[in-house]
Amino acid sequence: MRGFLLGAVLALITPIVAVIGVLLVMPDMRHAAFRAAVEVPGFGVSFMLRRALLGHNFSNVNLWLNRQMDMVEEFAPGQNALLPGLIANVEFSIEKARSYREFAAIRPFLRRLVDFDPVLFPARIWLARSLMHDQPKAAMEHLEAAAKLASADERTYRLAIGLAVRENWNNELTKWCQRYNREQFGGPRPHTYETIFGGIGLQRMALEIIDASNKLHLIRKSDLQLNDRYTYDFIFHEPLAVKELRLHVNTVPGISIKIDDLHLYRDGLLVARIPGNDLTLTSWGGFHLTDGRVLATARDGEIVEIQPSNLRYGSLDRIDLTLAFERLGLISNRECVGMPLP
């Protein structure tokens, strides 16, 4: 009997010891196991949310998001490894909400999320939307907070301008329209944001050069001028046999990009001037308008590939780009349309 019990204990302990040993000696396996463990709550709640959303039962959505919030709060204070899974489920749920009542149904959870992490930009936006119809002043307070967190993001202005129109707040309308046309600075982005810039704002761009040996060179600029035409010089460290050009712009949706001129230099001498109409442009996610502008729609910036129609770049040590960036309007009201470019 004693031998049987000993064997049973060993049978239970051996796999546990083996797993612990593997995790101790294999850091990659340990990391993978940890990541899998923190993803499990999000997957479980996601399944229940899908069932609730099929019937647009946002009361149940509020219930399940609060249960996941319980797990996040118990795991660790402040931002922690369980928070991204919660945010992903909130985003998935918010995308399905179509009426004021649906937004109001998840308001208790959204208040809790803002209290948990007051600097979480999307949470401020979501809570403001849920408050717009019956607590407009409270909604505007959260929009003010959101604008301080990421002042270039158009979602804040879209809600604030719509709220000012609905409530007939003319002074607020003028203020928010002017801010929308003026603001270029951003703030930290969520964990899903992935560009070469690492943050948001309408002041940064970069010229990517692929040389004849397919080596990548990147020249960054941080002086983008919004609602104006400006010539930006990109100076190489050494002459390069340029094969391809790509312009990376750290935009938010609703920005138009116009390339008016391309100047190519070598040893201080102008090699070629190419008007914008002679360039063939393609983009990774934008739309191309008949006047040559590229309309950026992505939240993770835009990439425009630049190809001259009847010319190869050749060996260069400097490229000047004459560019015009403009914020497009959020409302038909004249005050909310950016000043026209000269």
Image: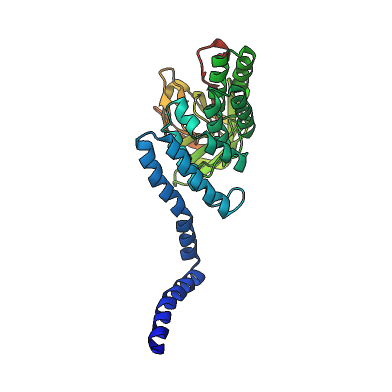
Q: Where is residue 2 drawn, in percent x and y? A: 41, 88
Q: Nearer the viewer, residue 312 or 133?
A: 133
Q: Nearer the viewer, residue 210 or 149?
A: 149
Taking the image as shown, residue 211 lies to the left or right of residue 147, namely left
Task: Identify the residue at horizontal 60%, vertical 16% (top origin).
Answer: 173
Q: Where is residue 273 drawn, in percent x and y? A: 50, 25
- Visible residue check, residue 321: no
Q: Where is residue 80 drawn, in percent x and y? A: 57, 51
Total count of labels = 0
Task: Identify the residue at horizontal 43%, vertical 33% (top origin).
Answer: 95
Q: Nearer the viewer, residue 328 or 3?
A: 3
Task: Identify the residue at horizontal 45%, vertical 30% (top origin).
Answer: 102
Q: Is residue 206 above or below residue 287?
A: below
Q: Nearer the viewer, residue 112 or 335?
A: 112
Q: Is residue 101 above or below residue 67?
A: above
Q: Where is residue 271 drawn, in percent x and y? A: 52, 29
Q: Specify the quadrant of the image occupied by residue 238.
A: top right
